[in-house]
Amino acid sequence: MTWISKNWTMTGIITGLMVTLKHVLHIGNRPTVTVQYPYERMKLAPRFRGRHAVDEDACIGCGICEVSCPNSTIRIVKYKGRWFPEFNLGMCLFCGLCLDACPMNAIKMDRGYELADYTRESLIYGPDRLLFKKEVNK
Amino acid sequence: METEELLINMGPVHPSTHGVLRFKLRMDGEIIKECTVVMGYLHRGTEKLAEMKTYLQFIPYTDRLDYISAMPNNYAYVKAVEELAGIEVPLRAEYIRVLTVELNRIVNHLVFMGSLLLDLGASTAIMYGFREREKALQLYEMLCGARMTFSYFRIGGVRDDLPDDFMSKLNEFIKDMEKRIEDYKGLINGNEIFMMRMKGIGVISAEEAINYGMTGPSLRGSGVNYDIRKIEPYSIYPDLDFKACVRPECDSYARYMVRIDEMEESLHILRQIADTIPKSEVVATQKYGIAPLTGMPYTAQTYFPRIFIPPAGEAYSRIEAPKGELGFYVVSDGTTKPYRVKIRSPSFCNLTAIPKMVVGLKIPDLIAAFGTIDVVLGDVDR
Amino acid sequence: MMIANAYELIVYILTTIGVYEPINNIFMSFGLDDILKIIIMLVEIAILFAFVLVTIMFLTWMERKVVAMVQSRYGPMVTGPRGLLQPVMDGVKLIGKEDIIPEKADRWIFTLAPFIVFVPALLVFIPLPFGESLIISDLRVGLLYIIAISAISPVAILLAGWASNNKYSLLGAMRAVAQDISYTIPLALAAIAVVLFTSSLSTVDIVNAQAGTWFGIIPKWFIFIQPLGFILFLIASIAEMGRIPFDFQESEQELVAGFFTEYSGMKFAMFFLAEYAHLFAVSGIIVTLFLGGWNGPVIPFIPVQITSLVYFLIKTYAVIFFAMWLRDTVPRVRIDQLLNLGWKIMIPLALLNLLITGFVVTAGVIQ
């Protein structure tokens, strides 16, 4: 309190007010930065790690991803007569170790980030929801 | 007149305890007589988990210790394992590591600044802080695909090389940040009300701070020149030109100012790295442990052996994380999994000094002092 | 013809249209001419009420927009053009909320408190001159009335805090009361310094005293004669409004939400509305006392009632914008620092200001 009586001109507050005023009036490269989320979305980086997808042709069902997963997210299940991984995204750390471990580069994590769901069961992504076919260039 | 001491529980669910932390306060009116910190509400058994995971699998868990700045956690852990196994890291990887860690220091201090001001009731600083943080997080997203839980470091290097346009974006960020720091200084540093709230509050002398095991900016705010990047140089820090920011005032304001200064120093480091980053591999190419099962060459996807067995032994390695000294003690018994991992987290040690700081102050001062210690509860409870 | 207040304005308008005489004759024939007066008064009060409610809704929107602009955000954008209908949606949401009364709370007082807060916030508008002759009632003790009515709200806040039976509520209420009491004094003292010049407590007289200019350039506003008084009044009224940097009654980092922690639904909305009504009223009082009220350059061909209303609103919104702007810039002071500031600095300065003003007025330096 003794201190404030020395600085009663309040220059610091006035400087602060000027900074905020500059933002209000957008002076000097201080634009509005937020986006209207559900209507527009930020662009994702190419390396963004989101929901998994498994290349149907490349996957050999070896189970290395299952072993490499730190959190036991992955289970190898039978689907259409072949073995494919099944991801329980409720447990997934999105660390990308399965992606690194896959010897066939069959796993991708490029399927977005809006993964909220109503039940735990629906967070288990079986091969029916994971598989994709790479387009073959002829 | 009959007076009565009042026992107040602040937390575990309280807006300004930055998570789940509980202060048991013995109050004499508005004055704090005694403060007890009750920790452990966020205990997840990370150290025990480490014993069940392989060395590589534990990296994602280190992200979740100090989730504001995950890169230093990654770094401290892989550095310990590298020391244990005696792995040489290529120079470019070291540069990238220091780059990401220093970027993360800026991110951490931005969040610190914002949340401190939010605790004091000013809502604008956190928005400004998060605006710049968002840019840094986009850099991280470009670099490793995640925004907060990176798991970017690998034993012997980093996961991926820098993307093509990363450096130009980084330079943009640095240029932008220089101006923004001026804004923060104008908005906060000279503010009389801010100074009224911070100066002379939460005083802890240098000796006491050392006794409590405080490290990092909180200790340097007490005038102790203790920066592990300086006193025990690691990685490429000896080649870089920067100074440890020290303030002698020992109060909350000094601890805040140290962090603002550090942001500028980190920017300076980033600028140097952007100029001098060499071209080389980003992962160690030497063969160690057991070779990859597939026998394929080390490419970006398969550089690291899936079964990695370091020799039996132990290693302790520490780095200067944004919050202080972050140490990992790793014991190997010659199997694929660590025998023991002990984490010396800065938040935990710094937090123990709070009861000493706040005796005789009021609850708003406790919040201010607690804000300047800059803890993340994930780091405190592990 | 001089039109003193809104009642006479309505009568004047009706007379000019030519409908007042027949209506009055009808009522006179039944001997009910008092009823007509009451009806007209009810109409003007309804207009005021509607105006205040719309203003409050606009202010909540404006608050969010100003915060957003300061923080490089958009703010509400979805409901209506630029989110202008957001307050309506908020209101709908709040009405739809469950109205919880805590089991241990004092039901009567708990229910009554929001109304006791809200009614004085509206009563303040009665002697507030919105423009030339746009005033409900030009009380001869208007300023005293405003200060006295504002002093009711701490009572209601204390009732709310006490009735909630919650530690945080009670603490918040106590703080609010301590703050209100310690800042009403410099507020009143700064206002009295203005009264010394006008020798009248009537708000209309105060505004009229500020008409005209010095040297043809500087308007004769009291801010130029009373700069210290203005600053003191501004700070004290921000403290009275309970906004950052002085928002102790609801400092969410210390007391969860202050005295309305336990309130929900419409009762919470009442506190909320009262806060913004108070904000508008206090800004209007600042304009009236120091910024020349409705005075401004006369524009030909437009009735002075409209131009003066526009001038008043522009000035008031400028003050409101300043309050919002300040709120977004500064942190909160500590409660003891706040009281120190009030008792040890503001009150002595206000007394000093009063003393100097007294000398100046007695010496007749400024007429």
Image (cartoon, grey):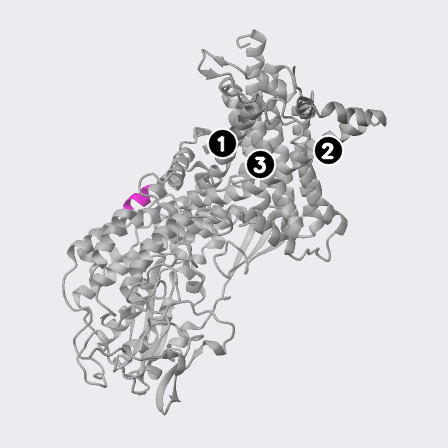
Query: Which residue is at the front of the view, A39 or A45?
Result: A39
Dot 3: chain letter: C
User: Tag 2 or tag 1, which sits nearer the N-term?
Assistant: 2
Question: Magenta region: which residues?
Answer: B178-182
Q: Furthest-right residue in view? A: C30
Residue that badge 1 annotates: C318
What secondary structure is marked by label 2? helix
Residue that badge 3 annotates: C279
Question: How would you rate the neighbour count of disc 1 (Cα within 10 Å): few for under 14, some for 14-19, many for 20 or more?
Answer: some
Tell me what residue is drawn at x 62 percent, y 40 percent.
C53
Residue that badge 2 annotates: C42
Query: Quadrant where the C terminus of chain C lies?
Result: top right
Q: Amino acid at mark 1?
A: Ala
Q: Amino acid at mark 2?
A: Leu
Q: Is residue B219 left or right of residue B351?
A: left
Tell me what residue is drawn at x 50 percent, y 63 percent.
B39
Tell me which corner region of the image, top left, top right, bottom left or bottom right, holds residue C131. top right
Query: Which residue is at the front of the view, B59 or C221?
Result: C221
Camera-near label (1 vs 3) is: 1
